Image: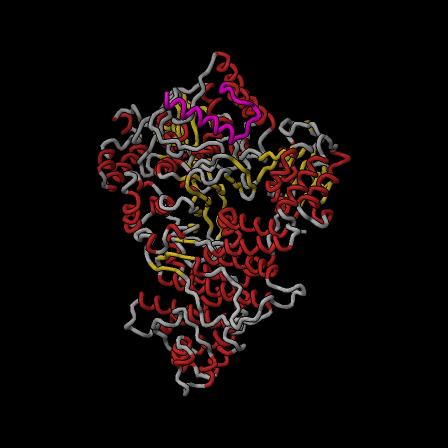
Amino acid sequence: MELTLKQQEKAAKEFAKKWENIGDEKQDTQRFWMELLQNVYGINNPADFICFEHRVQLGHTSYIDAMIPATHTMIEQKSLGKDLNSPIRQSDGTFLTPAEQAKRYAAALPYSERPRWIVSCNFKEFHVLDMERPNDSAEIIELRKLGTEFYRLNFLVDVKSSHIQREMEISKGAGELVARLYDSLLEQYKVNPLLTEEAVLHNINKLCVRLVFCLYAEDSGLFGKKSLFHDYLQDFQHHQVRNALMDLFRILDTEEANRNPYESETLLEFPYVNGSLFSDPVEIPQFSDDAVNLILEDACNFDWSEISPTIFGAIFESTLNPDTRRHGGMHYTSIENIHKLIDPLFLNELKNDFKEAMSRKDGKKRIELLKALQDKMASKTFLDPAAGSGNFLTESYLSLRRLENDILRETITDSSGTGVLGFDEEEFNPIKVSIQQFYGIEINDFAVSVAKTAIWIAEAQMFKETEAIIHKEMDFLPLHNNANIHEGNALQMDWENIINPSQLSYIIGNPPFVGSKYSSADQKKDMDLVFKPYSKKYRKLDYVTSWYVKSAELLSKNSAITCAFVSTNSITQGEQVSLLWNILYSMGVEINFAHKTFRWSSESVDGAAVHCVIIGFGYKGKASKKILYSDGLASYTDMISPYLVSGFTGVVSSSSKPLFGQKPMVAPNKPCDYNHLKIEPDEYIEFKNKCPQSLKWIKRMVGATEFINNKERYCLWLVGCSPSELRQMPLVLKRVEACREARIAADTDESRKLALTPMLFREQLNPESYLIIPAVSSERRRYIPVGFLDKSVIPVMGTLIIPDADLVDFGIVNSNVHMSWMRAFAGRLKSDYRYSKDIVYNTFPWPKLTKENKIEIERTANLILSARALYKDSTLADLYDELTMPIELRNAHRENNKAVMKAFGFNLKMTEEECVAELMKLYKDRLNQ
């Protein structure tokens, strides 16, 4: 049963009151969860939805308290009064928190049964951990606040729609048919030597758009007669199809009154389409037997009426123009992902208005509110300034029209539900939401055609749904409305020429995903136009950021506009954040909602995926409460930072030097040896056997991979080696000569200079002792593995080092406080942490330590080193895997965390985001001192 928000709020409050201060793990778990699912979340048969005491083998038989298979949720229930953060003794003698206990269960399950969500509960609090982001702090939902925060547990019942899945499969099948047709036609176009490659692409794309529209129009009844297109074409031989299509396209673009009455009867049966779809000239090739058979036997036998225009538009474009889309940096969008953007931007508010209206018992007032809502929807305007195939505009239109159809069911049918009130007019059209509310800008001419076609198909589908509601046929063709999709470069255009800012409600979309290093010369020129008035360092920004600045300029003309873009997560990390948001903050922009990093999966055949964020923003002060989503789990906050962490605003600016008294961190050695001074393990044996006198000049070499995985690798470290000794080591001399030749061959100023000292690395850093930090580390680790090394080991690229570091430095860098700062501000390599000296370490607000603080941190740092030493056969990768981390090491880190948090004066129970917010205050305060 579907509950309105008010009904849900009331049920949640009643549930919280009923279960206040009661709850026994053994007696009450099943009743608690079944009542929650049924009364608050509308699950009619909770016993079929949730299972209890699920058996799992851990060397002995254990039982998982509860599982919700449909949403991949595992529940570990404890009695009232149990601290969910405190380790509990297990039957094998280990101590684990409830979440850690659940993780151990999860590791023992078959892969397909492993949970996405782990919920620890003590009848007073729900601690929710998303295993897609295992190192994030658990989200805490208090039972007493459930009445206002019930939405935060929606993931428990969020089962993906099977209807969407069916639409997706149908649309992919349609895309595959188009691809086959495209390949067949392409061969025929190549016969004409006068057509350039660009002309071929332009014409084949336009022809495919027209053929798809005809196939859809036939199956959906828009042509007025089933199989009209098929029956027309089958009367021609393959060599006649070219002329037959030319005649058909001419007829479809001619109003009935202006047609020649001597045309064939079959042609005259086709309706006038309008909408400019068939107006422009198109070069049509001769059709082969294969191409004709593909249309008549495969394409015409496929049911095009059930495709999703949102998905199909993107698949259509990616099928016909894969190179264009890939080189443009664009990715295609699932319906589910589109709703991550449009739901919080505008759709949730409209749906809540609908539910609120429907909850009114006064029928007159209910209809009054519903009609006002319909007018409100019809007044909204949308701009996608990187429209691509129009999937954001199409899905937004479909969402509004579906809601409008829900309103029409309630407001225009009579009490029997079989007729329409006031149906005296000859031309009755109750539809107010129009495709003319939707504007787009797209640089690719073919994508413009696809977008227009997709939105026309969407309009036709909704038109049919409305006809079924009002029980009256309405003429869809000829097309009365134009899709306002404009061809052009959005970064070189004045958006005010597309739509007046005073008339604009929302700016949406997913602009091109191109990193700063990969922008083309033309894209850099685009960024010159956008950024030059604001910043000199914009060349370090990703291409997508240009759309943020252009949108902010419109916000200055109309502060009521709100915006949301999908972007690569790199713009929320590292140096890019301060470069972009110092501009946006100066323009009065703030974040209203955001989705933290998630995989943005393609619906194209190659299934491309990229790590993305969604950022919704508007003029400062327009939205009092902000929403931060972590892969489906929402939380309200007063502030969202550009790093997508709640509780603070502002940015951290890169610094080449430590800001707060910490010891200097430096980059390690860069060999620049073209692999001639490096020695692999098997090569080391050769040196040992053939040139034993060289061993004194060989040292172990460590980058991030070698350090974390304890891999052996060596290098020639010839600092201080005399020329005479060098000449007595032929194997070594051969390597040095090869290095010299490679540096000369590289032919750069630096390499030619380095060729003068071919026996040495570019740097010769070899501290007596140092702390080493891998520059890149898996996001699945809660702690970046950090350790001490001495002068017998040479650090190289992929790491950072702190020379002469001590146990206090080790303890602080290893702490959850420092790791929280790192997770908030570090860059990413895909989704892995990219630790930075200038952004993470140098900006970290190092604590001001008392003598007692130092003694305690030294003690806990030693505990970590001792715990590691217990497992000499294990690598750091083994030790810091969340599934295999030894309990001794986990406990040692807990002790160290407490010591460091105490040094900062932090509450031991604060969440990671609260910790970062406090650190940000320290950062700002100390910079201003």
* Residue 896 seen in the figure: yes
- Residue at image position (38%, 52%) is 329
Horizontal relation, residue 250 to residue 57: left or right: left
Q: Is residue 24 above or below residue 905?
A: below
Position of residue 907 measured from the top left corner of the image (x, y, whole percent): 55, 23
Choose between 454 and 574: the one closer to the eye. Answer: 454
Q: Is residue 395 above or below residue 237?
A: above
- Residue at image position (47%, 35%) is 639
The colour scheme used here is secondary structure
Position of residue 270 measured from the top left corner of the image (x, y, whole percent): 46, 78
Choose between 686 and 121: the one closer to the eye. Answer: 121
Horizontal relation, residue 192 to residue 573: left or right: left
- Residue at image position (54%, 73%) is 301
What's the magenta bit mostly, secondary-structure-wise? helix
Range drawn in magenta: 903-929
Residue at the bottom extreme of this rendering: 262
Is 913 a magenta residue?
yes
Choose between 631 and 110: the one closer to the eye. Answer: 631
Choose between 538 and 295: the one closer to the eye. Answer: 538
Position of residue 502 measured from the top left corner of the image (x, y, whole percent): 38, 50
Position of residue 657 measured from the top left corner of the image (x, y, whole percent): 34, 25
* Residue 171 seen in the figure: no
Q: Choose top left, top right, bottom left or bottom right for residue 406.
A: bottom right
Is 20 a magenta residue?
no
Horizontal relation, residue 27 to residue 88: left or right: right
Residue at the right extreme of this rendering: 27
Q: Where does the C terminus fall, quadrant-wise? A: top left
